[in-house]
Amino acid sequence: MLPNTDELTDVLLDLAVPHQDIDEAVRLSRRVTSDTDVLRILEKAVADVVQDMGRIRGTTVDIPALPDASTATARFFPLYVFVAALPHIRAHHRERGIPDEVGRRTLADVGRCVAWYRRWHGTGGLLIPQWLTLHFHGELYQLGRLQFQRSRVDERTGASIAAAGLPQRPQDLGLAVHVPDFMGPLTPQAVERSLALARTFFARHYPEETYSVATCESWLLDPQLKRRLPKDSNIVRFQERFHLAHPPTASEAREAPEAPEDMEPVRFVFGTTDVPLDQLPRRTVLERAVLDHLREGGHWYVGRGWFEL
């Protein structure tokens, strides 16, 4: 199910795997191809990823861990799952007429997750592999600065959209917006370009699906950021595009209080949650804003929002 050594190197480069991790990934792949038990796990994992290719599942798929999860082979195992799934997603892209350039940039998120793993752990591996199952199922695409996921509107966001008088309801189609790391500043110009690309892309390649709203669920939409960042910051201007979904009512909050997500901005801004907060750098306005808010006893939350496309 895996290409030979020479071809595997080319595939890893296509997936933007960092050069420093390629030698180890190629070497360890021989252990996978020579172990019938591991190959069976690999085959089942690939089948789960590509099942009902192109259908909106709305959830990610768990990638199984090898029995000895502490080994280097186990760290790289999810990478081999996506290498083996590559022909399936490329076939879907061809069927939909999706340009090779879009497919290549979308699947390059594999390399980003390898880079994340090394940033967090200092070794080779693949972080949050379940996230990549969206890319390899034709549900998520990189279009310029942003990623867009064919999705459905959740209950809370759908209620907010309906309250604004739009015809969309929960579980109707919505285009979920994601902001990937390692892609430069989130400027208004970059966001506008991505939105223009998305409007054209989905109308052309998924014409049977109508996307009239974009949604986002992210720490970037916590309204408290507006009090901590300059008005002209890229994050504030990104947030201002959205109608924020209504927070829970007082009675709802008492029954099911919203849990803070203090480590979400820490994880994305600093690339780790293992370093004590008082030892993290304070080089930028955003770094200082995240840390000062927590130091003063505040909490960060994941916000939800939407806007019309």
Image (tube, rainbow, N blue to C red):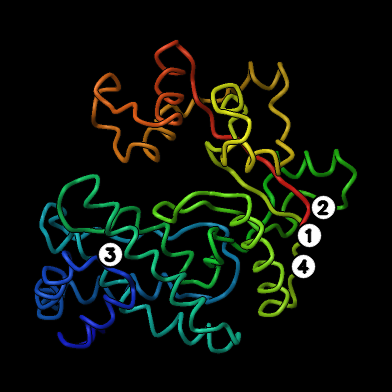
Disc 2 marks a residue whose amino acid type is: Gln
- Quadrant where the image shows the N terminus: bottom left
Examine the rendered structure and indicate whether residue 215 appears above or below residue 19.
Answer: above
Q: CA distance from mark 4 to mark 1?
A: 6 Å
Disc 1 marks a residue whose amino acid type is: Ser
Disc 3 marks a residue whose amino acid type is: Pro
Q: Are marks 2 and 1 in contact (CB under 8 Å)?
A: yes
Q: Position of residue 229 (x, y in %)?
A: 55, 27
Identified at 51% across, 51% down, the residue is: 179
Which label sits in the foreground, 2 or 1? 1
Dot 4 or dot 2, earlier in sequence:
2
Which of the labelled discs sits on residue 78, or is there none? 3
Q: Are marks 4 and 1 in contact (CB under 8 Å)?
A: yes
Examine the rendered structure and indicate whether residue 253 appears above or below residue 275.
Answer: above
Q: CA distance from mark 1 to mark 3?
A: 35 Å
Residue carrying label 4? 210
Check disc 1 and report its element: helix, strand or loop.
loop
Disc 4 marks a residue whose amino acid type is: Thr
